Image: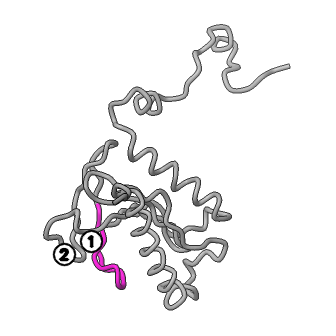
Amino acid sequence: MTGSAPNPDADAVAWGDLLAGSYREIGERAMRDLPIYNDALGVEAVGFRAFNGTIVGIMVTPWFMNVVLPASAVAQATSGATARIRFPAGDIEFTISEVGQIGRIASCSLFSPMFQFADMDAARATAEAALAELMLPADSEEAVRRREPATTPIDRRNFLRGTLTERRG
């Protein structure tokens, strides 16, 4: 008998797709006519993957972008409660809520409303970048480098001339 090994990332993608379906229904039923709804966007599950025995990804909708995971990752949490979950980048606070037939989820808001995004490509790229940052260990060389201010050395001659921020002819 041949078979394939279980694929936790495939399960994560499937869960993200189910969650996206619930949000599509919510969008059509309850959100479309609200002033926070960005018609240029759709609903998409971005980057869903297995993580520390659960699932994590980013849900993009026309009204929010959230990091989400099943609330089963948070023991005994009830809707409206908050929970801190450890990620490589650090501890993140999530709020527990109920979503349609999916049940309880934990979510952390990244953006709401979503008017700073002109299209799904921009929203998706932001979601992918946010998830990459979340998975980057806080003490890694890359994370430390990103936290350093992007400054250029002060040129003594320009400092004394007062031309640090503008060029003079």
* Disc 1 target residue: 96
Give the residue type that dot 2 points to.
Thr
Residue 67 to residue 20: above or below: above
Q: CA distance from mark 1 to mark 2?
A: 6 Å
Dominant secondary-structure state across the stretch colored magenta: strand
Q: Residue visible at 40% across and 61% down?
A: 67
Q: Are marks 1 and 2 in contact (CB under 8 Å)?
A: yes
Q: Residue visible at 47% across and 79% down?
A: 23
Question: Whole-percent x and y of residue 116?
Answer: 61, 62
- Could you say whether the residue bearing mark 1 is in a helix, strand or loop? strand
In magenta stretch: residue 61:
no
Extreme residue toward the right, this view: 169
Nearer-N-terminus badge (1/2): 2
Residue range highlighted in magenta: 94-105
Question: Whole-percent x and y of residue 151?
Answer: 55, 24
Extreme residue toward the front, this view: 1
Q: Residue visible at 59% across and 53% down?
A: 125
Question: Whole-percent x and y of residue 57?
Answer: 41, 59
Give the residue type that dot 1 points to.
Ile
Q: Quadrant of residue 50?
A: bottom left
Residue 142 to residue 50: above or below: above
Q: Residue visible at 65% across and 77% down?
A: 39
Dot 2 crowding, Cα within 10 Å, few <14, some 14–19, many 20+: some
Question: Whole-percent x and y of residue 9?
Answer: 40, 56
In magenta stretch: residue 96:
yes
Q: Is residue 29 left or right of residue 163?
A: left
- Figure quadrant of the N terminus: bottom left
Dot 1 crowding, Cα within 10 Å, few <14, some 14–19, many 20+: many
* Disc 2 target residue: 78
- Could you say whether the residue bearing mark 2 is in a helix, strand or loop? loop
- Figure quadrant of the C terminus: top right
> In the image shown, does 67 or 13 lie closer to the viewer?
13
